[in-house]
């Protein structure tokens, strides 16, 4: 029997203020334990899609489509309040900038306690033990001391580890990571990717990894979907996409990345909307 997808998007379109479509007719599945990459240039709609799954879109956004199932429950059919409750065990997100994930005013431990608000049965001591355990699992040395630290006392890489631990504290079926290594240096990036691979193996969590870096996608993903101007223009196993890209935009993306590596630049250049995606040339 085919397993039920953890995430199942069918013909999803999203527009802001009823005008320009940020996402057009996107269908995408993430299976249990799978890591799917979503790649595309800035403005192609990756974050809009991710935020819609988490109910984080502003009120000006409207989402339509056949269904948006997370762990078997259709988010399009749920009210905003019901969606908020589905989100905890359903999906959790790791953001690009770990400094912005935490308030600078409160100790890490206190903020992580807030992630466990749903768990009313455990005592504060039990919650503290769980958090310290989760920090140790995320490779944080001396987790008791980090529990009492303020965010400014920790490095960006350490804070990103903590935000991954925090997301997993909610035991989500799907972890959405939106450019989780972009704000980090190369060494920390490698450590974070290693941690995510290990956590996937240990916990079986499915991951939707948003990135504009092909290197990150190649490192961790089983499958990749390429977004261009709000649409998924190509999708397939990561090895196939790299060895035999079929869509003109994917080919352009791969050759851009190669020249960026040579130039030492970091971001993908945008390709003119006037170009026909199928006709884009490297
Ligand atoms: N709050 C908003 N109001 C209006 N338009 C928005 C809003 N957020 C995003 N957009 C528009 O939606 C489109 C998709 O943007 P989105 O941020 O989803 O792309 P992205 O691929 O995630 O880009 P990046 O990699 O830069 O984050 C863009 O044209 C953007 O200008």
Image (tube, grey):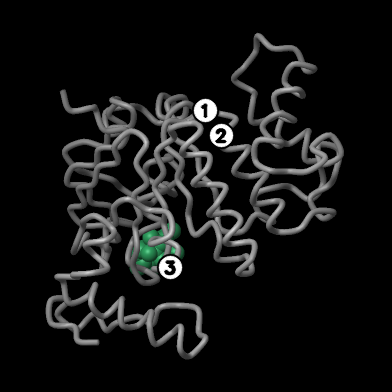
Residue that label 2 marks: 168
Q: Answer yes or no: disc 3 within 8 Å of ligand 1.
A: no
* Near-viewer residue (194 or 28): 194
Classify residue 194 as left or right of residue 66. Answer: right
Label 3 sits on a secondary structure element that is: helix
Disc 2 to disc 1: CB gap under 8 Å: yes
Between the C-alphas of marks 3 and 2, the distance is 24 Å
Instruction: Look at 42% across and 54% down and name the residue there.
Output: 220
Which one is closest to the eye, mark 3 or mark 2? 3
Residue that label 3 marks: 215
Q: In the figure, residue 31 lies in which quadrant?
A: top left
Classify residue 235 as left or right of residue 45. Answer: left
Between the C-alphas of marks 2 and 1, the distance is 5 Å
Question: Who comes first in sequence, dot 1 or dot 3?
Answer: 1
Q: Is residue 41 above or below residue 195?
A: below
* Near-viewer residue (232 or 203): 203
**Residue 7: image location, x then y, percent:** 30, 37
Quadrant of the frame with the N terminus? top left
Residue that label 1 marks: 171
């Amino acid at each position: 029997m085919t397993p039920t997808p953890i995430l199942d998007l069918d013909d999803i379109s999203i527009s802001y203020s009823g005008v320009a479509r940020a996402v057009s007719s996107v269908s995408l599945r993430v299976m249990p334990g799978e890591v799917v990459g979503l790649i595309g240039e800035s403005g192609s709609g990756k974050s809009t899609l991710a935020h819609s799954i988490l109910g984080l879109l502003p009120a000006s956004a409207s989402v339509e489509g056949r269904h948006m199932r997370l762990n078997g429950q259709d988010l399009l059919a749920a009210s905003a309040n019901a969606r908020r409750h589905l989100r905890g065990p359903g999906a959790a997100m790791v953001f690009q900038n770990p400094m912005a994930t935490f308030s600078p005013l409160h100790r890490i431990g206190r903020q992580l306690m807030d992630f466990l608000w749903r768990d009313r049965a455990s005592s504060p001591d039990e919650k503290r033990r769980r958090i310290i355990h989760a920090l140790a699992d995320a490779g944080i040395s001396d987790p008791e001391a980090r529990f009492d630290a303020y965010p400014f006392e920790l490095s960006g890489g350490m804070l990103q580890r903590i935000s991954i631990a925090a997301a997993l504290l909610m035991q989500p079926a799907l972890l959405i990571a939106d450019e989780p290594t972009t704000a980090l240096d190369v060494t920390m990036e490698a450590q974070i990717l290693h941690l995510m691979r290990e956590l996937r193996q240990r916990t079986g969590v499915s991951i939707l990894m948003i990135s504009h870096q092909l290197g990150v996608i190649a490192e961790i993903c089983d499958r990749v979907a390429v977004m261009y101007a709000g649409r998924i223009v190509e999708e397939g196993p990561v090895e196939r996409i790299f060895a035999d890209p079929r869509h003109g935009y994917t080919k352009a993306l791969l050759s851009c990345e190669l020249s960026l590596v040579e130039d030492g630049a970091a971001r993908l250049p945008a390709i003119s909307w006037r170009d026909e995606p199928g006709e884009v040339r490297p």
